[in-house]
Image (cartoon, grey):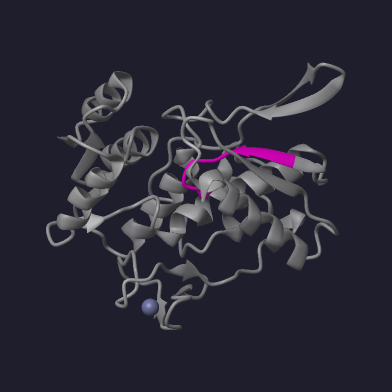
């Protein structure tokens, strides 16, 4: 059994052992999971065709209690004009999005530290992912979604058995509703909880292994709030510090023209 990991608040410096369900600092700041050592290629569990093949790199105490076989998605080569480009098919996940990496690791951490009912706010994919894994774990779950969220995602969330709250107005109004519910159940937020990034980092490990323990020059990452690109950065950082790679790929955050908040900022 490994040592208990620690959360640290970059705003005020307070540290917390990751042995309880918390999602932000008492000062209101976000928490980071302290840096970890990562793994050597000999630590990979090659018999496991899921992200749990990298369990040695994850800050969890025990084997996962809930898994739906997430991760180890295909990496395929296609030509874009004259250029060979590789596509990582993250839609080949249990609920259809990359969010399952973060959800699976975050929920297994929360189960380890004794979480009760949870809630989350999402415009679609994260809500579907968390609702599905909560169902698999037997946790009560409520998801706040924008009234204008895609119908298919709303149906997917409801089909998992989660309680659905549709909120009119902006995406921010949905987050406000989830924040107002913090006293009722645990806010298992994919945008706040550090263990979500701990899960998305396995994308870096997978790319490295699937490329024959090498890294690409450049990675273009579709980016909303940033959990995928933050996870890639964390994963490649660990591989560098472990001495498994000697250079890091350049990461490019790419946003859709009609929803480019980071680019605008
Ligand atoms: Zn703080």
Taking 184 as reference, is 208 above or below it? above
Name the quadrant containing residue 47. top right
Res 160 → quadrant: top left
Callout count:
0
Q: Quadrant of ligand 1?
A: bottom left
Q: Magenta includes 223?
A: yes
Decide: is 79 above or below 162.
above
Give the camera-side residue of 122 and 209: 122
Say left or right for 12 vs 117: right
> Residue, x 21% and y 37% (percent of image)?
169
Q: Position of residue 112 (x, y in %)?
A: 35, 61
Residue 198 can be seen in this image: yes
- Write the residue at 45% across / 53% down: 196
Q: On screen, 79 above or below 26?
A: above
Name the spot of residue 204 as percent of width and height, x first: 67, 48
Percent position of residue 39, x then y: 69, 60
Query: With 195 as the anchor, is 251 left or right in this view?
Result: right
- Please tell me whether residue 181 is drawn above or below residue 76 in the rendered image: below
Residue at 65% x, 27% y is: 74
- Location of residue 116 in the rendering, given as x and y in whole percent from the top left corner: 20, 57
Q: Residue furthest front?
A: 264
The answer to whether residue 185 of the structure is visible from this angle is: no
Which residues, given as a range, are shown in magenta? Answer: 219-227
Assess whether residue 42 is covered by the magenta stretch.
no
Between residue 180 and residue 214, name the one nearer to us: 180
Q: Which residue: 32% across, 23% down?
A: 150
* Front residue of 72 and 166: 166
């Amino acid at each position: 059994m490994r040592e208990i990991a620690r959360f640290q608040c970059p705003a005020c410096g307070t540290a917390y052992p990751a042995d309880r369900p918390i999602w932000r600092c008492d000062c209101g700041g976000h928490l980071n999971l302290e840096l970890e050592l990562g793994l050597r290629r000999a630590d990979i569990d090659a018999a496991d065709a899921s992200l749990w093949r990298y369990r040695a790199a994850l800050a969890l105490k025990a084997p996962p209690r809930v898994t739906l076989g997430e991760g180890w998605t295909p990496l395929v080569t296609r030509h874009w004009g004259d250029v060979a480009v590789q596509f990582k098919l993250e839609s080949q996940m249990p609920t259809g999005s990359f969010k399952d990496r973060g959800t699976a690791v975050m929920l297994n951490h929360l189960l380890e530290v004794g979480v009760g009912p949870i809630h989350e706010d999402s415009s679609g994919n994260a809500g579907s992912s968390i609702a599905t894994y909560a169902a698999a774990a037997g946790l009560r779950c409520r998801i706040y979604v924008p009234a204008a969220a895609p119908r298919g995602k709303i149906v997917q969330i409801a089909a998992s058995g989660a309680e659905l709250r549709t909120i009119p107005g902006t995406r921010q109004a949905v987050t406000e509703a989830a924040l107002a519910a913090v006293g009722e159940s645990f806010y298992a937020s994919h945008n706040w909880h550090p263990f979500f990034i701990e899960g998305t980092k396995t994308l870096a490990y997978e790319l490295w292994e699937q490329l024959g323990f090498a890294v690409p020059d450049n990675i273009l990452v579709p980016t909303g709030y940033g959990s995928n690109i933050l996870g890639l950065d964390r994963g490649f950082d660990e591989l560098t510090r472990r001495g498994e790679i000697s250079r890091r790929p350049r990461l490019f955050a790419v946003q859709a023209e009609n929803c480019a908040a980071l680019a605008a900022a």
